Amino acid sequence: MDVALVFTVGVFFAVSIYLMLSKHIIRILLGVSIFSNAVNLTIFSAGRLLGEMPPIIPIDADTPSQTTANPLPQALVLTAIVIAFSIFAFLLVLAFRAYQEIGTDDTDEMRVAEPKGNELPPLGY
């Protein structure tokens, strides 16, 4: 199971970086969304994905009697999912509004903020 999870996370990171290097805003946004999912899977897998018991201590004991699941990565991932979704929704609306104003989603053509009459900065470095 660990090898499959590592392979899946690697594919998520590779696809997200490929999409974020695109010139189109929608592909960049999808890449950011997939990147956040890859990070969440990485955090979640760091918290041990074994079939362990919930972290509940019996009444008559001071410590758990057996190995328990770590609730911290689960809480972090749950919070990260909510934050990533809200950021994605905001950026999607922002990209749609930019497309309505400019008429393109190509980042090279979105250079309307540059002053007229001056040389444009280089497209690549």
Image (cartoon, helix red, strand yellow):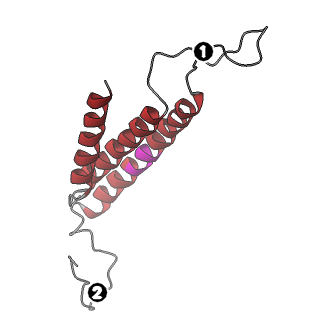
Q: In the depicted view, which residue is nearer to us: 91 or 41?
A: 41
Are there few (<14), some (14-19), or many (20+) residues within 10 Å of tag 2? Answer: few
Alpha-carbon span between mark 1 and mark 2:
70 Å
Vertical relation: 89 (above or below) 104: above
Q: Which label lies toward us, 1 or 2?
A: 1
Q: Secondary structure at mark 1?
A: loop
Q: Secondary structure at mark 2?
A: loop
Q: Is residue 61 left or right of residue 51?
A: right
Q: Is residue 64 magenta?
A: no
Q: Which residues are magenta?
A: 87-91
Residue 89 place in picture, x, y as percent: 42, 43
Q: Residue at x 23, y 40 (%)?
A: 11
Residue at the spot of label 2: 116
Q: Is residue 89 magenta?
A: yes
Q: In the depicted view, which residue is nearer to us: 8 or 27?
A: 8
Residue 96 place in picture, x, y as percent: 33, 51
Residue 8 place in picture, x, y as percent: 27, 34
Residue at the spot of label 1: 66
Residue 71 place in picture, x, y as percent: 58, 27
- Along the polypeptide, which appears first: circle 1 or circle 2? 1
Question: What amino acid does circle 2 point to?
Answer: Lys
Is the stretch drawn in magenta largely helix, strand or loop? helix
Q: Is residue 108 left or right of residue 49?
A: left
Question: What amino acid does circle 1 point to?
Answer: Gln
Please state, as top left, top right, bottom left or bottom right, where the C terminus lies in the image: bottom left
Please state, as top left, top right, bottom left or bottom right, where the N terminus lies in the image: top left
